[in-house]
Image (spheres, grey):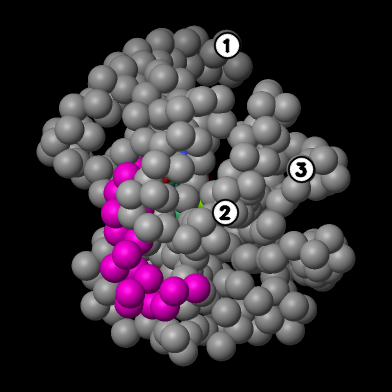
Amino acid sequence: KSKVEGKNKHTIFIPAMMEDNKRRLLLANSITPGLKNNEFQVYYQPKVNADEHIVGFEALLRWHSPELGNVSPGEFIIIAEQSGKINQITEWLLKEVMYDYASILAHFGENTVVSVNLSAHDLKNTKILELITALYDRYFINPKCIEYEVTESTYLENFDMANECFENIRSLGSSIALDDFGTGYSSLSYLTQIKLNTLKIDKQFVDNLGISQRSTLVTKTVIEMAKQLNLNICAEGVETRQQMAFLVAHGCHQLQGYLFGKPTDLATLLATPYKRENK
Ligand code: C2E
Ligand code: MG
Ligand code: MG
Ligand code: MG
């Protein structure tokens, strides 16, 4: 049995791999023209407090390509990183977000925080800090209203460089959030070495709430630890009232997920009757 299966796998594997490589190459080569042709768009997903009032939004990239259809960031961000295109994407994204910032704050209040995802390669890009500073100037941005989300894998390789970049961002007055907490390697050791403002609890933990006693206990412990470390805590991927009730009862006061809103484009966002904090 195994021989036949092995043979079949072999013959199927190679064309599949070629298809895969072809698609990756096609995507990689379509990023720069795609940016020029306005195929990319920034979507925003709400973050709310325990009263379900808006505290901020996370910027999430979307790519609608006429030839390739909708390509998810889960696919194109990795390809952009591997093909050296991520800096272009991030620079484009930062400009868009800073441009949108004024209408978001005018609508939702001056304490609204807009979060942007950064990738590992962005932290090595020496131009990124200059760009951020220039955009803050150009668009009269209060640095406190911008937060940068990074995942653990982001600085696995180049810890010192990443840490320096975080310090620079923090000295501008903006904050750093550790994204997808609990899914990477050595999460706990990073917590002792990096100055963070926010811990984002990964959707995995939220999904498992109430499903097993053990995973519920782990989630409770993570929230407790973040509180002890004086970090803001934001739970990702909240989809049910039960999850929300549990998280709030245990002191997690920032929530993000489909229960409160999916990512949408700016026009839709401004037309959605979200509850605002009193200005
Ligand atoms: P992330 O930063 O952890 O973003 C959260 C992801 O979870 C988003 O997926 C969001 O749409 C999704 N999500 C939020 N709430 C729910 C929920 O209740 N249920 C479910 N099933 N999903 C939910 P998205 O937009 O597909 O992005 C995936 C990842 O791609 C992001 O994970 C982030 O790591 C990366 N990404 C997205 N935009 C950017 C970007 O502009 N720059 C960089 N460097 N990475 C980005
Ligand atoms: Mg994020
Ligand atoms: Mg996340
Ligand atoms: Mg994620």
Residue under pointer 3:
194
Disc 1 is placed on an element classified as: helix
Depth order, front residue of 128/45? 128
What is the x, y in percent for residue 93? 35, 43
Q: What is the C-alpha distance between the residues marked 3 and 2?
A: 15 Å
> Mark 3 vs mark 1: which is more N-terminal?
1
139 lies left or right of 207? left
| Residue 36 appears anywhere in the view | yes
> Mark 1 vs mark 2: which is more N-terminal?
1
Residue type marked 2 = Ser
Q: Residue at x 64, y 47 (%)?
A: 171
* Quarter location, residue 186: top right
Residue under pointer 2:
174
* Quarter location, residue 99: bottom left
Q: Residue at x 57, y 11 (%)?
A: 3
> Mark 3 vs mark 2: which is more N-terminal?
2
What is the x, y in percent for residue 114? 46, 61
| Residue 221 appears anywhere in the view | no
> What main secondary structure does the magenta stretch of the protein show?
helix
Residue under pointer 1:
3
